[in-house]
Image (cartoon, rainbow, N blue to C red):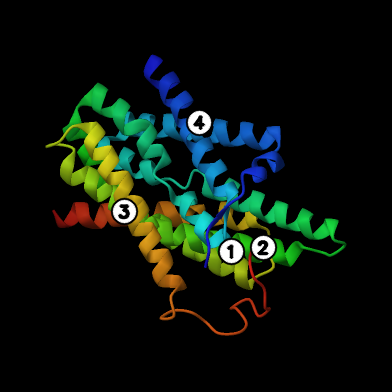
Amino acid sequence: MTEYIIRFLVGGAVVSFFAVLAEMLRPKSFAGLFSAAPSIALATIGITIARHGAAYAAIESRSMILAAVGFLVYASACSWVLMRRKVRALTVTTVLLPVWFGVSIGLLWILGAAR
Amino acid sequence: MMVQCKISAIKGIQLHEWITRFLFGGAVCVLAGLMAKWFGAEFGGLFLAFPAIFPAGACLVEAHERKHKARAGFDGTQRGRTVAGVDAAGAAMGCVGLAGFALVCWLCLRHWSAAVVFALATAVWFAVSLAVWRLRKSRLFRRRGRNAAGHAFRPS
C-alpha cells in the first residue's frame, strides 16, 4: 500500500511540474513537447527498480517505446482533427484515446507474436 | 523562432486545474503500477507512456485562448481549437523524444546505475524532441502563407 501512496504523490508532483512548464512556454508547438514528457516514467521507474529490480524496469521500458509510438499516432490524430473539424479539445482527446491504446497493444501483440 | 518562458502564466492557472493535474498524474502512476502487477511488466510498461498531461493540457490551452479572445471582444472558439491542435502537434513531436527516453532506459538500466540512466535518458528525450521541433520549424518543412486550418494566425 505504501508503494502506491508514494507512486500517487510522486506521480502527481512530477506530472504537475511538467504541466506547469508546458503552460509557461511559448510558442505552443514547443510547449507541446512537454505534453509528451516522460513524467510517469520518471516518477515510477525508480520505485519499480527498488521493488522489482533493474531487469523488470528494463522490460517495462521496452514496452514504453511501443506506447510512445501509440502516443505519436494519437497526438497526430488529435492535432489533425482539432485543426480541421469544429470539435472541442476535450471531446477529441477523450474520444481518440482508444487510438493510443489500440496502436500500443497492437504493436505489443505483433512484436510478441514475432518473438 | 524564439522560445519564451512566461512565469506570469502560472498566475492564470486556477486551483481546480492544479488539483486536476495532480490527481490525474498520481492516478495514472498508480494505474501503471497496478497494470504491471496484474498483467506483467510488458503490459504495465505501456502505461509509462500514457498521455497523462496531454488531454488536460489541450483542454486548458483551448479554454485559455478562448478567454483571451473573449476579453478582447472576439469569439475565440475556433482559435482555441486551432492552438490546441498546434499543442497536439508539439506533443506528437515530443513522442519521438519519449521513445528515445524509453530506448535508453531499456538498453542501459541493466548495466548502469538508475541515476545515471535517468539523467542520460532525460537529456536524450529533450535533445531529440528539440531536434525534431527545430527540423519541423526549419525551411525544409515550413509552409508558406496560410496554415492547414485555412486561416492565417500565429499561435501565441
Q: In which quadrant will I find the N terminus of chain A?
A: top left
Residue A86 vertical placement versus A66 (above, below): below
> Which residue bears the numbered disc 4?
A12
Q: Percent from the top left, x then y, of residue A112?
A: 20, 51
Tell me the crowding category of disc 3: few under 14, some 14 to 19, or many 20 or more residues within 10 angstroms, Cα based: many
Badge 4 sits on which subunit? A
Which residue is under mark 3? Answer: B99
Subunit that carries the residue with mark 3: B
Residues beneath discs 4 and 1 located on the same chain: no
Q: Whole-Å distance between the Cαs marked 3 and 1?
A: 21 Å
Amino acid type assigned to the residue bearing label 2 in the image: Arg
Q: Are marks 1 and 2 in contact (CB under 8 Å)?
A: yes
The local secondary structure at tag 2 comes to helix
Marker disc for residue A53: none
* Image quarter of residue B105: top left
- Secondary structure beneath dot 1 equals helix
> Can residue A66 be seen in this snapshot?
no
Q: Secondary structure at mark 4?
A: helix
Q: Amino acid at mark 1?
A: Gly
Q: Are the residues flagged by discs 3 and 4 from a single subunit? A: no
Name the residue carrying label 2.
B81
Within the image, what quadrant is residue B135 found in? bottom left
Q: Is residue B29 visible?
A: yes
At a point 70% along the width and 61% down the height, the residue shown is B80
The percent coordinates of residue B60 (x first, y second) are 65, 49
Q: CA distance from mark 1 to mark 2?
A: 6 Å
Work out whether residue A14 or residue B30 is closer to the camera in this orientation and state it. A14
CA–CA distance between discs 4 and 2?
Answer: 27 Å
How far, Cα to Cα, is label 4 from label 1? 25 Å
* Mark number, residue B85: 1
Residue B30 sits above or below residue A33 on the image: above
Q: Residues within 10 Å of mark 4 (few under 14, many from 20)?
A: many
